[in-house]
Amino acid sequence: MIGLALAAQAAPQPAGSDDIVVTGERLTRESARRYVNDVSRPVDGQLPTFRNPVCPGVIGLPAEQGSVIEARVRKVARHVGVKLAKEGCSPNLRIVVVDDSQTFVSELHKQKPEFFGGMELTEIDRLLKDQRPALAWNSVQLQNEDGNVYASNSAGRSSFGRMSQNRVSAGNDQAQAAEGMPRAGAGTGTMRASSASIIKQSTQQAILQSYVVVESAAVNGKTPMQVADYATMRALAAVQPPKEPEQVETILTLFEDGREAPPSIRAPDVAYLKALYSASPTLGKMAQLNRLTKAVLETSPEEPAGAGK
């Protein structure tokens, strides 16, 4: 077992509303498009989403703070249309607070590589080299439109796995994911598809597990709501912080140096999640990105009457 230590606790949440932001700043189509393209991380031509009910869990914080964060994750997830598991469920969205995020992830990869199932080797390498205080990754599985998975003919039974040759195998139970899974070149396999479309694909990318690891020093001074909203955005949508200064407010900049910390999840983030989870998971990347851009742009306040005249 990898030990978890907490050097600093999250600051108490200030008095005020914990409502979810629904009104954003004025945007242009270009700024909305740039935000969507910059943060999105497609997997094999599609945007991954949770298909099973989401169950958040927090490790490395006092139980009381962890419960507050879990409740906030559930509130945002429910607001954007994500199915939730009942209380007492086994977590598939884990928020972990540690002293050193990079060291923790590196040791976890050495000791429990199955926790990185469904990731390309290049993705794992990039994650292990990331020196930022907040790291996140998702275990993603290829499924057909009905949620069925790749079947290993050599095994003679249905097994979880990725058809892509350069991805790490993944399973429903991460503790057993590395055992009994078909590896590249281990026999042949088939994927049944019952439909075909120009717009939609016959497959979907399903998130099985999401992990968000944050350093305790970075958490210090942040409210539970801020931490929860950041983790929710990264875990539910498999997105990344924007690479360049944005004209769009987003909770994804919470742990970025030199940027003002957003007080909570922002309107474009909420619109992104709502549009992502209300769409068919079999949509292709371009159709999804266009849909998300339109949704984000619609958060922009209308031009006041007579403005610019």
Image: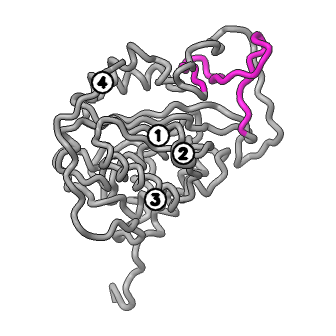
Percent x, y for residue 204? 65, 39
Circle 3 residue: 75
Disc on the earlier residue, 2 or 1: 2
Q: Secondary structure at mark 4?
A: helix
Side (left or right) of 237 relative to 35 = right
Q: Is residue 79 magenta?
A: no
Residue lying furthest right in this view? 194
Total numbered labels: 4
Disc on the earlier residue, 1 or 4: 1
Of tags 3 and 4, the one toward the viewer is 3
Q: Give the Cα separation between the discs numbered 2 and 1.
A: 7 Å
Relative to 108, say whether 303 is above or below: below
Q: Give the Cα separation between the discs numbered 2 and 3.
A: 12 Å
Query: In this view of the protein, which residue sits in the foreground, 92 or 229?
Result: 92
Relative to 111, say whether 290 is above or below: below
Q: Give the Cα separation between the discs numbered 1 and 4.
A: 17 Å
What label sits on residue 54 in the rendered view?
A: 2
User: Which quarter of the figure is the N terminus placed in?
Assistant: top left
